[in-house]
Image: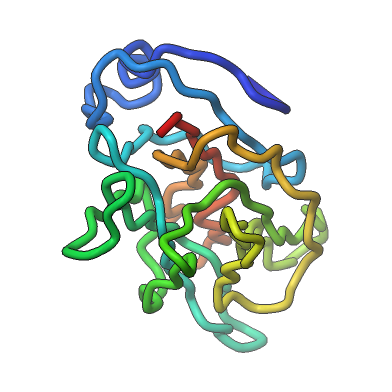
């Protein structure tokens, strides 16, 4: 499922990638959008989907602040989608997030203006350095493109490089899946979130 858009049956995906987690949709067909610069560590977690008939109108970010020269940094640990029914932004949102790392704190949500919706994303990633005692971090920040061209950027540090944008959703983003490296133990180098996939659904 690497690169571009891939059609899949979410019911089948939940069984293979989610270890029994229900993604929240029935057997609907969706497409996957990805980027090419994700980090190499960890495994893909379960997908989490907006409730049926809703879409992502905002995002929030779990980020660990820089820890200092001798401490271990993980930077971006998680992403949440804030979902709303099509055509209705008033009222409460539904929040979905897939798996998140244990470090850091959640930001306040960033919203697409004018009842817009999320249609794409980009990742800032520190490439593997493979040096003795180097602090690998992997994904450090993320940007999400809204349907009106607005960009929602997280509060992550300015380490690494921004990659290219994912393909745009033909409809709107309606789900998320993360690639996470699990905690490696005391005095080991952790990277937390490495990569991201988003799911697109038609309105």
Residue at 61 percent across and 34 percent down: it is 33
Q: Position of residue 158 (x, y in %)?
A: 72, 77
Asked if residue 61 shows in the view, the reply is no
Q: Position of residue 79 (x, y in %)?
A: 44, 57
**Residue ID at (68%, 45%):** 38
For image coordinates 64% across by 36% down, the residue present is: 34
* Colour setting: rainbow
Q: Is residue 155 above or below residue 14?
A: below
Front-most of residues 70 and 110: 110
Q: Quadrant of the C terminus?
A: top left
Observer-nearest of 81 and 157: 81
State which quadrant residue 166 falls in: top right
Name the image quarter holding residue 176: top left
**Residue located 46% across and 22% down the image:** 30
In this view of the protein, which residue sits in the foreground, 123 or 117? 117
Indicate whether 153 appears above or below 182: below
- Counting labels gives 0
The answer to whether residue 22 is left or right of residue 31 is: left
Q: Position of residue 157 (x, y in %)?
A: 65, 78
Quarter of the image with the N terminus is top right
């Amino acid at each position: 499922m690497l690169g571009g858009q891939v059609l899949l049956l979410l019911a089948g995906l939940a069984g293979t990638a989610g270890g029994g987690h229900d993604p929240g949709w029935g057997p609907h067909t969706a497409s996957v959008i990805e980027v090419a610069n994700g980090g190499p560590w960890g495994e893909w977690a379960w997908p989490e989907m907006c409730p049926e008939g809703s879409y992502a109108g905002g995002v929030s970010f779990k980020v660990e602040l820089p820890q200092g020269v001798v401490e271990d940094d993980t930077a971006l640990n998680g992403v949440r989608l804030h979902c709303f029914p099509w055509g209705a932004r008033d009222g409460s949102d539904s929040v979905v997030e897939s798996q998140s790392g244990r470090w850091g704190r959640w930001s306040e949500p960033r919203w697409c203006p004018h009842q817009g919706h999320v249609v794409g994303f980009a990742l800032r990633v520190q490439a593997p350095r493979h040096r003795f005692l180097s602090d690998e971090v992997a994904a450090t920040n993320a940007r999400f493109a809204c349907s009106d061209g607005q960009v929602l950027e997280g509060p992550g540090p300015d380490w690494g490089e921004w990659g290219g944008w994912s393909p745009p959703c033909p409809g709107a983003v309606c789900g998320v899946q993360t690639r996470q490296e699990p905690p490696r133990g005391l005095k080991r180098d952790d990277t937390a979130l490495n990569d991201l996939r988003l799911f697109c659904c038609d309105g």
